[in-house]
Amino acid sequence: MTTQLLSKSLNDYAESFTTKESPALARLNRETHLKIDLPIMLSGHLQGAVLSMLSHMIKPRRVLEIGTYTGYSAICLAQGLTDDGLLHTIDMNEEIEAMAFRYFCEAGLEKKISQHIGKAASIIPRLDEEFELVFIDADKQGYSQYYDLVFDKVCVGGYILADNVFYDGEVILPEEDRSKNAKAIHDFNEKVKNDHRVEHVLLPIRDGIMMIRKMTT
Ligand SMILES: C[S@@+](CC[C@H](N)C(=O)[O-])C[C@H]1O[C@@H](n2cnc3c(N)ncnc32)[C@H](O)[C@@H]1O
């Protein structure tokens, strides 16, 4: 999950012309890199700013995130919530729950973010909400199932975003050379492409973000 579509210098240039990370996000980014396994999973400055910008454009009342990790993308997505808005975020790793919560407090968003610990497939059906925005960023083999589980909970005109849809560039390898995860991601991309209820665009940002708009039930 490290696809660098832009050269490092162009990526640095893009970041330098992107609103600076807030102090809380910069500290979270640094602490994740210093202390937590697989910091590459964190959305980071550029993608985080894109998520924040999209959230401000959509102004959602309810957001669902699948894959909290240390909370970076949750903070970015929560920034565009309405005053009475709430973001539900799910992760099965309870070891990083407290760290994420500490940063939700630092960002002043602890009342707007509800953390759920457990497997996404069992938590999603229990959420009695209608979402304007969903961000899928957990285990890659679960993407298609999560898409099906959330679809009826997304309002018409609402959005589903899915991260890592290039899977480090593996999706364009010959089928026999793709890993299991890359196959699952490619199948997810095909599923979205063949779903006539939605419009979609694959944004070539970082490791690829599939942006989906629900047109009809
Ligand atoms: C790529 S990270 C999320 C990164 C985060 N959205 C960000 O941008 O900072 C994926 C997370 O999904 C969680 N995860 C993996 N499988 C899961 C499952 N079946 N249910 C819930 N969470 C899961 C992992 O524990 C991990 O923290």
Image (cartoon, rainbow, N blue to C red):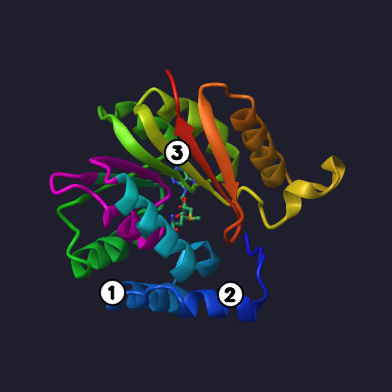
Give the residue type that dot 3 points to. Ile
Q: Of label 2 and label 1, which has the lower sequence position?
A: 2
Q: Residue at x 78, y 48 (%)?
A: 172
178 w.r.t. 76: above or below: above
Q: What is the distance, in whole Å, between disc 2 and disc 1 at their CAs?
A: 22 Å
Where is mark 2, residue-wise?
11
Mark 2 and mark 1 in contact? Answer it, CB < 8 Å.
no
Q: Of label 1 and label 3, which has the lower sequence position?
A: 1
Where is mark 1, residue-wise?
24
Query: Residue 77 occupies which quadrant of the picture?
Result: bottom left
Q: Which residues are magenta?
A: 59-86
Give the residue type that dot 2 points to. Asn
Residue 66 is labelled as: none
Look at the image and tell me in which quarter the N terminus lies: bottom right
Secondary element at image label 3 = strand
Q: Is mark 2 within 8 Å of ligand 1?
A: no
Question: Residue 211 colored magenta?
Answer: no
Q: Position of residue 136 (x, y in %)?
A: 47, 43
Query: Residue 51 occupies which quadrant of the picture?
Result: bottom left
Q: What is the distance, in whole Å, between disc 1 and disc 3 at their CAs?
A: 26 Å
Q: Tell which of 156 and 2 is nearer to you.
A: 156
In the image, 189: left or right of 74? right
Q: Of label 2 and label 3, which has the lower sequence position?
A: 2
Where is mark 3, residue-wise?
160
Question: Residue 75 colored magenta?
Answer: yes
Give the residue type that dot 1 points to. Ala
Q: Residue at x 51, y 22 (%)?
A: 197
Q: Is mark 1 within 8 Å of ligand 1?
A: no
